Amino acid sequence: MKILALGGPGAMGRVAVRVATGLPGVREIVVADRDVEAARRLIRELADSRVRMSARKVDVTDEAELDAALNEADIVFNTVGPYYRFGLGVLRAAIRTRTHYIDICDDWEPTLQMLDLDADARAAGVCAVIGMGASPGISNLLAARTVARLDTVTDLYTAWPVDVPGSGAEETDLRGPDGRPIAAAVHLMQQISGTVAVVSSGELVQQPPLQPVTLTLPGGRKGTAYTVGHPEPVTLQRSYRPEGDSANLMVITPGTVAYMDVLRREIDGGRLTNETAATDLAKPSMRRAMRAAVRAVKFKTPGSLPPFFAAARGIKDGRPTTILAHLTGTAALMKGMAEATGIPAALGLAQLLDGTVSRPGVHPPETAIDSDRFFADLAERAKPIAVVIEEAS
């Protein structure tokens, strides 16, 4: 098949394209970006690939240019962020041109809009998988593992590491080669400001982000994590209908969440934009660092929470039960945001390529991806990663 890798030269796209060159069924990859020279550099780096590769200039905001590129592809692999700006338009174009689609959308606002295109995608015969990265993506599939062990679900949480020591995530560089903040950093500022989607008493609602959630989990693990606007509550609420609460959480140290809270207040007050806040996050200023240091005492620690997990509370065999699904051996996967997102995205693409995922419509990972196969592939790709399931009544 012919793959159009939109945003391929970006941090996540580079990893995803590299992995995709080794997938069965890939005949050709067109690396597309508005910076065609960056696309050509990536192709030169992958010169030993067995897959035919070419570069193409595509600006996703140019409808004619985007449609022309999509019309020549079987699948579009979209890593152009931030998705609250660009995701919906690319998916609409994929449906319009009848091109199968997969992305790493990690913004809750466009996720709602993209799910609303389900009927259009079905009518066009297009299979679209949205949010197939780390969080969302791996997190959704961990959640699926927990829900499968319960008769009814009350609360459902997903969580990912930001800077907890030993997780690997603390090594992520938030600046690109040009010194500007990467799209993921701009996205993060969007999702720690304003309001974000969570589930409360079974209903999808909007609340301010960075709210503390203290969890007691199987294995004696306990700690506090903080809400952020990733899309998992949006899709998991539709997929599993938790009767209580659901949120996506950051496992984060008090100093870092305090600094994010300082940025949040300035974004909400109009003193910073998402871009200027992301620049500051990548290179913290002394003034804001001092303000954060004062505030840090108000934030709780992650304690003994796993760095990357899903946890569900509910009823099993008539008894209240908590199920924890978490990853171990994550150093290879979490050595950078690019690997943590790009590798699972490419493994999701593999299931589109061979027809494991083929049902037309717009799907979140938990309703489309074969989780058993995915985690087996992930364990092979990012050794010695493994999924551990624990239970407590």
Image (tube, rainbow, N blue to C red):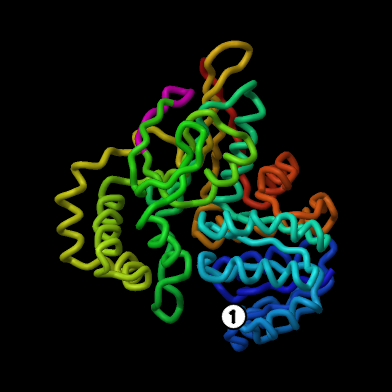
Instruction: Please rate how many residues cluster around mark 1, counting C-alpha atoms within 10 Å: few if below 14, some from 14 to 19, many from 20.
Output: few
Above or below, comparing residue 286 to residue 44 in the picture: above
Q: Position of residue 242 (x, y in %)?
A: 56, 31
The residue that appears at 75% across and 60% down in the rendered structure is 120
Question: At x 69% / y 85%, what residue is drawn?
Answer: 65
Which residue: 52% across, 18% down? 392
| Residue 219 falls inside the magenta stretch | yes
Asked whether residue 233 is in view, the answer is yes
Q: Is residue 317 left or right of residue 247?
A: right
Q: Magenta region, mostly helix, strand or loop?
A: strand
Give the total number of marks visible in the rendering: 1
Question: The disc labelled 1 sits on which kind of residue?
Answer: Thr
Q: Residue at x 65, y 55 (%)?
A: 116
Magenta segment boundaries in residue numbering = 217-224
Counting from the top left corner in percent of width and height, residue 163 is at: 38, 51
Q: Which residue is mark 1?
A: 61
The location of residue 341, given as percent across then percent down, is 57, 58
From this viewpoint, which residue is outermost toward the top? 318
